[in-house]
Amino acid sequence: MKNRQSAIKTTLIVAMFISLTGCAGMSRQGQGTLLGAGAGALGGAALTGGSAVGTIGGAAVGGLLGNVITQPRARGRYRR
């Protein structure tokens, strides 16, 4: 059973990295959102022992943070 779970996790990680190669045409903010969601999903799964709710929650929070952090800055925002 552990061998099967390990194989599934490895396959999912490899699939995630392969899918990230499609980011070449994406905006910086889109890339940040996707990267944040992936990292959040991995973190959520690790913290909750692989539960689906933890993984999905981590992906949602990570995607939101990745989106906000990579938002384009408004020029002249603080001009007087």
Image (cartoon, helix red, strand yellow):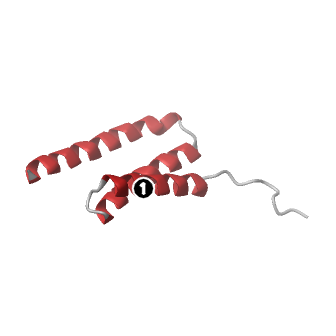
| Quarter that holds the C terminus | bottom right
User: x, y percentage for residue 55?
Assistant: 35, 54
User: x, y percentage for residue 5?
Assistant: 16, 49
Q: Amino acid at mark 1?
A: Gly
In this orientation, which residue lies closer to the viewer: 45 or 75?
Answer: 45
Q: Secondary structure at mark 1?
A: helix
In this orientation, which residue lies closer to the viewer: 43 or 72?
Answer: 43
- Report the residue marked by disc 1: 57
Which residue is rendered at x = 54% and y = 43% of the image?
30
**Label 1 Cα crowd, 10 Å radius (few <14 / some 14-19 / many 20+):** some
Which residue is rendered at x = 81% and y = 58% of the image?
77
46 sits to left or right of 58: left
Q: Which residue extends farthest front?
A: 53
Q: Quadrant of residue 79?
A: bottom right
User: x, y percentage for residue 67?
Assistant: 57, 51
Which residue is rendered at x = 42% and y = 56% of the image?
57
